[in-house]
C-alpha cells in the first residue's frame, strides 16, 4: 500500500481503536506471548523468570540464564535488552523476543535482562526511556540471578528496532551518570536495526515505501502515536540529527557502539547515517550492514539469526 493510498483503518493491525475524542482503546495483543519458566525440563538450555521493577507502572524484567551457569562460578557478561514494536506494540513476553533473547543468552553465554516498558499511545515518549533507565538502576538492586551470575563490570545495552532507539537514548543518559549506576560498568551499545525517523524522506524510505514488513505509512503511524503530542518526526526522540546528541562522555568512557541493518529495510539509510554521525563525533562504531534482508528478518529466517549471534559475540569479546 502506497503512502498516498487511503488506509481505511491503520490502527486495526496494531490492536487499537481510535475513539471520537482522539484517545485510543487497546483491544488485542498483536504478538503471541510466552510465559517465563524458571524451572523448565532438564533439556531446556535457558532458564527464564519475570521480576517486577515498578508495580505502579507495571514494568518488569524477564531474565535469561544459561542452565550451564548453575554449575559454574564464572560470572557472565550482562546484556540489558529493550524489545521492538514501534514503541506501540509487543512486550518482553512476546514469543519472538523470548526466542531471540533465549538464543542470544545461549550462543553468547550471557545473562539477558529484557525490559517490559510502557507502550504508546497510552504512555508517549519519554515514558519508555524513563522506564528503561529505571530498569538499569534496578539491575544492581540484588536479584539473586544477577548477584550470583553477573559480571557487573561487563555490561551492554542492546535494543532491537524501537528498542535500538531506546538503547541510544538511555545510553546517552547513562554516559553522563556513570557514578549513579555503579557498580555497573557499561562497555557499549548494540543498536540492532534501530528505529529512527525524520520529516524529510530518505532514499531507502522512498525506494521501499510499500515494503510488506514495514511500509512507510506504518512508520509514520508509530511516530504519530509515540512522540509527544504536537511533535513531528524531526523531534530529537525520532531524529538524532535534530538533537544535540552529546556523545563526549560515551567517547571518554571508551564505549563502542554496534549498529546493524539490512538493505531491504526502509530504515537502512537512517541507520547508516547514524553510524556515520557517531563516528564523526569520535565514537568507536562497529557497523554490520548486509545486503538483502528486511526489518526483523531474524524472526522469520533463522539463517539470518545464526549470522547475527557471532557478530554480537565478536563485539562483546573485543571490548
Image (cartoon, rainbow, N blue to C red):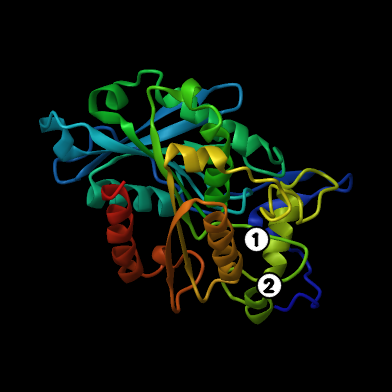
Snapshot quadrant of residue 274: bottom right
Q: Which residue is mark 2?
A: 202
Residue under the point 33% across and 55% down: 312
The quadrant where residue 9 appears: bottom right
Q: Is residue 11 visible?
A: no
- Mark identifier at residue 49: none
Classify 67 as above or below 96. Answer: above
Residue 17 visible in image? yes
Say what secondary structure mark 1 lies in: helix
Q: Give me the residue at 31% from left, 50% from top.
A: 104
Vertical side of 84 occupied by 288: above or below: below
Question: Left or right: 70 with respect to 207?
Answer: left
Of residue 4 and residue 140, the one placed in the foreground of this image is 140
Judging by the rendered image, the residue that carries numbered circle 1 is 13
Provide residue 273's location: percent of width, then percent of height. 59, 64
Q: Nearer the viewer, residue 140 or 101?
A: 140
Is there CB contact under 8 Å for labels 1 and 2? Answer: no
Amino acid at each position: 500500500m502506497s503512502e498516498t493510498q487511503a488506509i481505511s483503518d491503520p490502527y486495526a493491525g496494531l490492536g487499537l481503536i481510535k475513539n471520537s475524542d482522539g484517545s485510543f482503546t487497546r483491544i488485542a495483543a498483536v504478538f503471541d506471548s510466552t510465559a517465563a519458566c524458571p524451572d523448565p525440563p532438564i533439556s531446556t538450555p535457558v532458564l527464564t523468570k519475570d521480576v517486577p521493577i515498578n508495580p505502579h507502572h507495571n514494568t518488569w524484567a524477564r531474565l535469561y540464564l544459561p542452565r550451564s551457569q548453575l554449575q559454574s562460578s564464572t560470572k557472565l557478561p550482562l546484556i540489558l535488552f529493550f524489545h521492538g514494536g514501534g514503541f506501540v506494540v509487543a512486550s518482553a513476553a512476546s514469543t519472538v523476543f523470548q526466542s531471540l533473547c533465549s538464543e542470544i543468552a545461549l550462543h553468547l553465554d550471557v545473562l539477558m535482562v529484557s525490559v517490559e516498558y510502557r507502550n504508546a499511545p497510552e504512555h508517549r515518549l519519554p515514558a519508555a526511556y524513563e522506564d528503561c533507565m529505571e530498569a538499569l538502576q534496578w539491575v544492581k538492586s540484588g536479584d539473586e540471578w544477577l548477584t550470583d551470575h553477573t559480571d557487573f563490570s561487563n555490561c551492554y545495552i542492546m535494543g532491537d528496532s524501537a528498542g535500538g532507539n531506546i538503547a541510544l537514548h538511555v545510553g546517552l543518559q547513562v554516559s553522563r551518570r556513570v557514578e549513579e549506576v555503579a557498580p555497573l560498568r557499561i562497555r557499549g551499545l548494540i543498536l540492532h536495526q534501530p528505529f529512527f525517523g525524520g520529516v524529510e524522506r530518505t532514499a531507502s524510505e522512498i525506494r521501499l515505501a510499500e515494503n510488506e514488513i514495514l511500509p512507510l505509512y506504518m512508520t509514520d503511524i508509530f511516530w504519530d502515536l509515540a512522540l509527544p503530542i504536537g511533535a513531528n518526526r524531526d523531534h530529537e526522540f525520532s531524529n538524532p540529527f535534530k538533537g544535540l546528541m552529546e556523545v563526549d562522555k560515551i567517547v571518554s568512557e571508551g564505549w563502542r557502539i554496534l549498529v546493524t541493518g539490512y538493505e531491504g529495510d526502509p530504515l537502512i539509510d537512517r541507520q547508516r547515517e547514524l553510524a556515520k554521525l557517531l563516528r564523526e563525533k569520535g565514537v568507536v562504531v562497529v557497523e554490520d550492514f548486509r545486503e538483502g534482508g528486511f526489518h526483523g528478518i531474524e524472526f522469520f529466517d533463522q539463517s539470518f539469526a545464526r549470522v547475527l549471534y557471532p557478530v554480537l559475540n565478536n563485539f562483546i569479546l573485543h571490548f
